[in-house]
Image (spheres, rainbow, N blue to C red):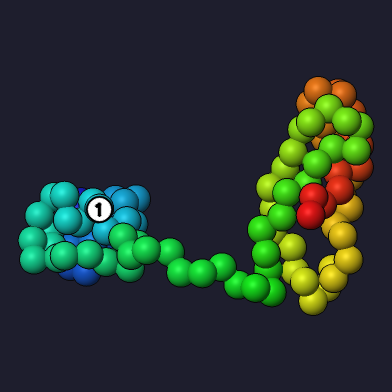
């Protein structure tokens, strides 16, 4: 028996068995013809206030930035990380911009 025959019907309907976990695949190929929207298509909700998005700017003055999220409970002060600066060609300190 081929692998296709062993898949459960739920995998075949969603397209997840084929590596297409998004709802777009199911709607586009007619496996969910009456679907209006699914959770993946919904508007994103507000980000957690405990984990704000912060921008880290290179202390070397090259203008390179990284964007990450920090945990306010563990790092209430300004975040400082040592990361690679491709313009400087070395690891330097990156400080959180306020």
State the residue at coordinates (31%, 60%): 41
- Label 1: few (<14), some (14–19) or many (≥20) C-alpha neighbours in 10 Å: some
**Percent coordinates x, y for residue 32 in the rendering:** 13, 62
Q: Position of residue 85 (x, y in %)?
A: 82, 31
Residue 95 appears left or right of 45: right
Horizontal and vertical percent position of residue 81: 87, 50
* Residue receiving disc 1: 24
Q: Position of residue 86 (x, y in %)?
A: 79, 26
Q: Nearer the viewer, residue 48 or 92?
A: 48
Q: Residue furthest front?
A: 98
Q: Vertically, is 55 above or below 44?
A: above
The quadrant in which residue 13 appears is bottom left
93 lies left or right of 16: right
Dot 1 falls on a residue whose secondary structure is helix
Pick the quarter of the image with the C terminus. Answer: bottom right
Q: Quadrant of the N terminus?
A: bottom left
């Amino acid at each position: 028996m081929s692998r296709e025959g062993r898949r459960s019907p739920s995998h075949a309907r969603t397209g997840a068995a084929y590596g297409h976990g998004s709802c777009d695949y199911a709607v586009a190929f007619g496996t969910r013809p009456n679907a209006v929207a699914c959770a993946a298509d919904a508007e994103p909700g507000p980000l957690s206030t405990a984990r704000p998005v912060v921008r880290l700017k290179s202390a070397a003055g090259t203008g390179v930035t990284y964007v990450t999220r920090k945990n306010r409970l563990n790092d209430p002060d300004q975040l400082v990380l040592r990361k690679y600066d491709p313009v400087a060609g070395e690891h330097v300190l990156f400080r959180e911009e306020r």
